[in-house]
Amino acid sequence: MGQLDPSLAIHVSTTDDGSLRSSLTPESQIDDQNTQTFLHRHGIDEQDTVLLRLSYDTADFCRYELVTREMAGRGFTHAQPTIADALLTRADGVALFLPIADCIGAVLYHPPSRTLMLSHLGRHNLEQQGGYESVRYMQQVSGFDPSELQVYLSPAAGKTQYPLFAFGNKSLHEVAVEQLVSAGVATRNIIIDARDTVTDPDFFSHSAALRGEKPVGRHAVVCYIK
Protein backbone atom coordinates (compact mmCIF):
# COMPACT_ATOMS: atom_id res chain seq x y z
CA MET A 1 0.00 0.00 0.00
CA GLY A 2 1.35 3.42 -0.92
CA GLN A 3 5.10 3.84 -0.43
CA LEU A 4 5.39 1.54 2.57
CA ASP A 5 8.40 -0.75 2.86
CA PRO A 6 7.98 -3.95 0.80
CA SER A 7 8.76 -6.12 3.84
CA LEU A 8 5.44 -5.01 5.37
CA ALA A 9 2.08 -6.56 4.41
CA ILE A 10 -1.24 -4.85 5.18
CA HIS A 11 -4.71 -6.10 4.27
CA VAL A 12 -8.02 -4.35 5.00
CA SER A 13 -11.30 -6.22 4.68
CA THR A 14 -14.48 -4.71 3.27
CA THR A 15 -18.19 -5.44 3.52
CA ASP A 16 -17.74 -7.89 0.64
CA ASP A 17 -15.79 -10.07 3.10
CA GLY A 18 -18.72 -10.01 5.54
CA SER A 19 -18.59 -9.07 9.20
CA LEU A 20 -15.45 -10.44 10.87
CA ARG A 21 -14.84 -11.68 14.40
CA SER A 22 -15.29 -9.46 17.45
CA SER A 23 -12.40 -7.73 19.22
CA LEU A 24 -14.19 -7.75 22.56
CA THR A 25 -14.15 -11.44 23.53
CA PRO A 26 -11.23 -13.67 24.58
CA GLU A 27 -12.51 -16.89 23.06
CA SER A 28 -11.00 -18.30 19.92
CA GLN A 29 -13.37 -17.99 16.95
CA ILE A 30 -11.84 -20.28 14.41
CA ASP A 31 -15.36 -21.33 13.43
CA ASP A 32 -15.99 -17.81 12.09
CA GLN A 33 -16.09 -18.60 8.40
CA ASN A 34 -15.89 -14.99 7.21
CA THR A 35 -12.69 -14.35 9.15
CA GLN A 36 -11.18 -17.66 8.14
CA THR A 37 -11.93 -17.01 4.46
CA PHE A 38 -10.50 -13.48 4.62
CA LEU A 39 -7.26 -14.66 6.21
CA HIS A 40 -6.83 -17.57 3.82
CA ARG A 41 -7.46 -15.34 0.80
CA HIS A 42 -4.36 -13.41 1.79
CA GLY A 43 -2.27 -16.46 2.58
CA ILE A 44 -2.51 -16.03 6.37
CA ASP A 45 -2.98 -18.99 8.70
CA GLU A 46 -5.04 -18.64 11.87
CA GLN A 47 -2.29 -20.27 13.91
CA ASP A 48 0.03 -17.40 12.90
CA THR A 49 -2.47 -14.65 13.79
CA VAL A 50 -2.95 -12.70 17.02
CA LEU A 51 -6.12 -10.81 17.92
CA LEU A 52 -5.89 -7.28 19.29
CA ARG A 53 -8.50 -7.76 22.00
CA LEU A 54 -10.08 -4.49 23.12
CA SER A 55 -12.11 -3.44 26.14
CA TYR A 56 -13.94 -0.21 26.90
CA ASP A 57 -14.45 -1.20 30.54
CA THR A 58 -11.38 0.72 31.67
CA ALA A 59 -10.01 4.19 32.31
CA ASP A 60 -6.73 3.42 30.51
CA PHE A 61 -6.73 3.34 26.71
CA CYS A 62 -2.97 3.25 26.22
CA ARG A 63 -2.19 -0.39 27.04
CA TYR A 64 0.39 -2.08 24.87
CA GLU A 65 1.55 -5.67 24.49
CA LEU A 66 4.73 -7.16 23.01
CA VAL A 67 3.83 -10.22 20.92
CA THR A 68 6.31 -13.07 20.57
CA ARG A 69 6.22 -16.03 18.19
CA GLU A 70 4.95 -18.19 21.08
CA MET A 71 1.78 -16.08 21.28
CA ALA A 72 0.75 -16.80 17.69
CA GLY A 73 -2.81 -18.11 17.41
CA ARG A 74 -4.21 -16.15 20.35
CA GLY A 75 -7.82 -15.28 19.60
CA PHE A 76 -7.98 -17.73 16.71
CA THR A 77 -6.76 -21.23 17.59
CA HIS A 78 -6.87 -20.57 21.32
CA ALA A 79 -8.07 -17.83 23.67
CA GLN A 80 -6.60 -14.34 23.81
CA PRO A 81 -6.36 -13.47 27.53
CA THR A 82 -4.64 -10.10 27.06
CA ILE A 83 -6.56 -6.85 26.67
CA ALA A 84 -4.57 -4.13 24.93
CA ASP A 85 -4.90 -1.06 22.72
CA ALA A 86 -1.98 -2.00 20.50
CA LEU A 87 0.18 -5.01 19.72
CA LEU A 88 3.85 -4.83 18.83
CA THR A 89 5.97 -7.60 17.33
CA ARG A 90 9.40 -8.17 15.83
CA ALA A 91 8.54 -11.73 14.79
CA ASP A 92 8.35 -12.32 11.05
CA GLY A 93 5.14 -13.88 9.81
CA VAL A 94 3.08 -13.20 12.95
CA ALA A 95 -0.06 -11.42 11.75
CA LEU A 96 -1.66 -8.79 13.99
CA PHE A 97 -5.45 -8.56 13.57
CA LEU A 98 -7.77 -5.70 14.59
CA PRO A 99 -11.55 -5.73 13.95
CA ILE A 100 -12.97 -2.17 13.76
CA ALA A 101 -16.05 -0.28 12.63
CA ASP A 102 -15.25 3.48 12.62
CA CYS A 103 -11.96 3.79 14.52
CA ILE A 104 -8.50 3.90 12.96
CA GLY A 105 -6.34 0.84 12.66
CA ALA A 106 -2.89 2.42 12.70
CA VAL A 107 0.00 0.34 11.36
CA LEU A 108 3.40 1.64 12.50
CA TYR A 109 6.52 0.06 11.05
CA HIS A 110 10.24 0.67 11.53
CA PRO A 111 12.01 -1.03 8.60
CA PRO A 112 15.60 -0.93 9.95
CA SER A 113 14.71 -2.82 13.15
CA ARG A 114 11.74 -4.70 11.60
CA THR A 115 9.47 -3.60 14.44
CA LEU A 116 5.72 -3.59 13.76
CA MET A 117 2.82 -2.18 15.78
CA LEU A 118 -0.92 -2.32 15.16
CA SER A 119 -2.64 0.34 17.26
CA HIS A 120 -6.35 0.98 17.83
CA LEU A 121 -6.94 4.74 17.64
CA GLY A 122 -10.50 5.71 18.46
CA ARG A 123 -11.90 8.65 20.37
CA HIS A 124 -11.00 7.20 23.77
CA ASN A 125 -7.43 6.45 22.75
CA LEU A 126 -6.84 9.80 21.08
CA GLU A 127 -8.19 11.69 24.09
CA GLN A 128 -5.35 10.04 26.02
CA GLN A 129 -2.77 10.89 23.32
CA GLY A 130 -2.83 7.35 21.94
CA GLY A 131 -1.00 8.25 18.74
CA TYR A 132 1.86 9.83 20.65
CA GLU A 133 1.98 7.07 23.26
CA SER A 134 2.06 4.34 20.59
CA VAL A 135 5.26 5.81 19.16
CA ARG A 136 6.77 6.21 22.62
CA TYR A 137 6.11 2.55 23.42
CA MET A 138 7.78 1.46 20.19
CA GLN A 139 10.80 3.58 21.10
CA GLN A 140 10.99 1.95 24.53
CA VAL A 141 11.10 -1.48 22.91
CA SER A 142 13.47 -0.77 20.03
CA GLY A 143 15.10 2.59 20.76
CA PHE A 144 14.87 3.97 17.20
CA ASP A 145 14.54 7.44 15.70
CA PRO A 146 10.77 8.04 15.22
CA SER A 147 11.44 9.99 12.02
CA GLU A 148 12.26 6.61 10.45
CA LEU A 149 8.79 5.23 11.20
CA GLN A 150 6.33 4.51 8.41
CA VAL A 151 2.62 4.75 9.27
CA TYR A 152 -0.58 3.63 7.57
CA LEU A 153 -3.93 4.92 8.88
CA SER A 154 -6.94 2.85 7.87
CA PRO A 155 -10.34 4.18 6.75
CA ALA A 156 -12.25 5.75 9.65
CA ALA A 157 -15.31 7.84 10.43
CA GLY A 158 -15.07 11.35 8.97
CA LYS A 159 -15.64 14.52 10.92
CA THR A 160 -18.97 15.36 9.28
CA GLN A 161 -20.74 12.52 11.10
CA TYR A 162 -18.11 11.81 13.78
CA PRO A 163 -16.41 15.04 14.94
CA LEU A 164 -14.09 14.85 17.95
CA PHE A 165 -15.53 17.49 20.25
CA ALA A 166 -12.50 17.38 22.56
CA PHE A 167 -10.32 18.47 19.63
CA GLY A 168 -12.37 21.30 18.14
CA ASN A 169 -14.44 18.98 15.94
CA LYS A 170 -11.44 17.64 14.05
CA SER A 171 -11.54 14.18 12.49
CA LEU A 172 -9.99 10.99 13.81
CA HIS A 173 -7.41 11.14 11.02
CA GLU A 174 -6.51 14.78 11.69
CA VAL A 175 -5.95 14.22 15.40
CA ALA A 176 -4.03 10.98 14.86
CA VAL A 177 -1.65 12.70 12.44
CA GLU A 178 -1.09 15.59 14.86
CA GLN A 179 -0.21 13.18 17.68
CA LEU A 180 2.09 11.06 15.52
CA VAL A 181 3.94 14.13 14.26
CA SER A 182 4.27 15.45 17.82
CA ALA A 183 6.03 12.17 18.66
CA GLY A 184 8.56 12.72 15.87
CA VAL A 185 7.00 10.87 12.91
CA ALA A 186 7.69 12.62 9.60
CA THR A 187 4.50 13.79 7.89
CA ARG A 188 5.79 12.45 4.57
CA ASN A 189 5.91 8.97 6.11
CA ILE A 190 2.21 8.90 7.05
CA ILE A 191 -0.19 7.35 4.54
CA ILE A 192 -3.86 8.10 5.18
CA ASP A 193 -6.61 5.96 3.69
CA ALA A 194 -9.16 8.79 3.75
CA ARG A 195 -12.25 6.72 2.97
CA ASP A 196 -15.07 7.54 5.39
CA THR A 197 -16.48 4.40 7.03
CA VAL A 198 -19.75 6.18 7.82
CA THR A 199 -20.59 6.92 4.18
CA ASP A 200 -18.52 4.42 2.18
CA PRO A 201 -20.50 1.23 1.44
CA ASP A 202 -17.28 -0.81 1.45
CA PHE A 203 -16.97 -0.52 5.24
CA PHE A 204 -18.98 -1.20 8.36
CA SER A 205 -19.73 1.71 10.68
CA HIS A 206 -20.80 1.48 14.31
CA SER A 207 -22.17 5.02 14.33
CA ALA A 208 -24.13 4.49 11.11
CA ALA A 209 -25.47 1.17 12.41
CA LEU A 210 -26.77 2.88 15.56
CA ARG A 211 -28.80 5.20 13.32
CA GLY A 212 -30.10 2.28 11.26
CA GLU A 213 -28.19 3.42 8.17
CA LYS A 214 -25.93 0.37 7.89
CA PRO A 215 -25.98 -3.22 9.13
CA VAL A 216 -24.06 -4.08 12.30
CA GLY A 217 -20.65 -5.53 11.53
CA ARG A 218 -16.88 -5.20 11.63
CA HIS A 219 -14.18 -4.98 9.00
CA ALA A 220 -10.56 -5.56 9.98
CA VAL A 221 -6.96 -4.54 9.49
CA VAL A 222 -4.33 -7.28 9.49
CA CYS A 223 -0.59 -6.75 9.08
CA TYR A 224 2.64 -8.72 9.34
CA ILE A 225 6.34 -8.61 8.55
CA LYS A 226 7.16 -10.74 5.52
Image (cartoon, rainbow, N blue to C red):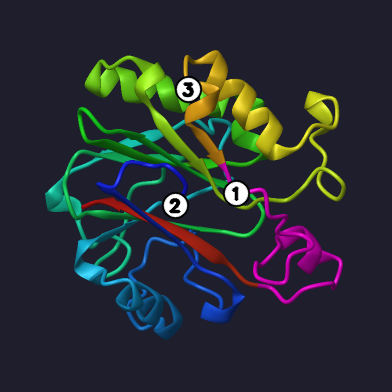
Q: Earlier in the sequence, mark 2 or mark 1?
A: 2
Q: Residue placed at 29% from the left, 47% from the top? A: 6
Which of the numbered marks, if any, corresponds to residue 1? 2
Of discs 2 and 3, which sits in the foreground?
Answer: 2
Vertical side of 6 occupied by 212: above or below: below
Q: Is residue 193 magenta?
A: yes
Name the residue furthest left.
70
Q: Residue at x 67, y 54 (%)?
A: 102
Q: Is residue 36 depicted above or below 6 in this figure? A: below
Which mark is on residue 53?
Answer: none
Mark 1, residue position: 193
The residue at which mark 3 appears reads as: 133
| Disc nearer the start of the sequence (3/1) | 3
Q: Which residues are the magenta region?
A: 192-216
Secondary structure beneath disc 2?
Answer: loop
Instruction: Compare residues 104 and 211 and report the one nearer the observer.
Output: 104
The amino acid sitting under disc 1 is Asp
Q: CA distance from mark 2 to mark 1?
A: 10 Å
The location of residue 203, given as percent across then percent down, is: 65, 67
Answer few, some or many: residues within 10 Å of disc 3's Cα (few below 14, many 20 plus, some between 14 and 19): some
Q: Earlier in the sequence, mark 2 or mark 3?
A: 2
Q: Is residue 77 visible in the rendered structure shown here?
A: no
Q: Under tag 3, what secondary structure?
A: helix
Identify the amino acid type marked 2. Met
Q: Are marks 2 and 1 in contact (CB under 8 Å)?
A: yes
Q: CA distance from mark 3 to mark 1?
A: 21 Å
Q: Is residue 181 visible?
A: yes
- Rendering coords of residue 147 (x, y %): 40, 18
Q: Position of residue 217 (x, y in %)?
A: 62, 72
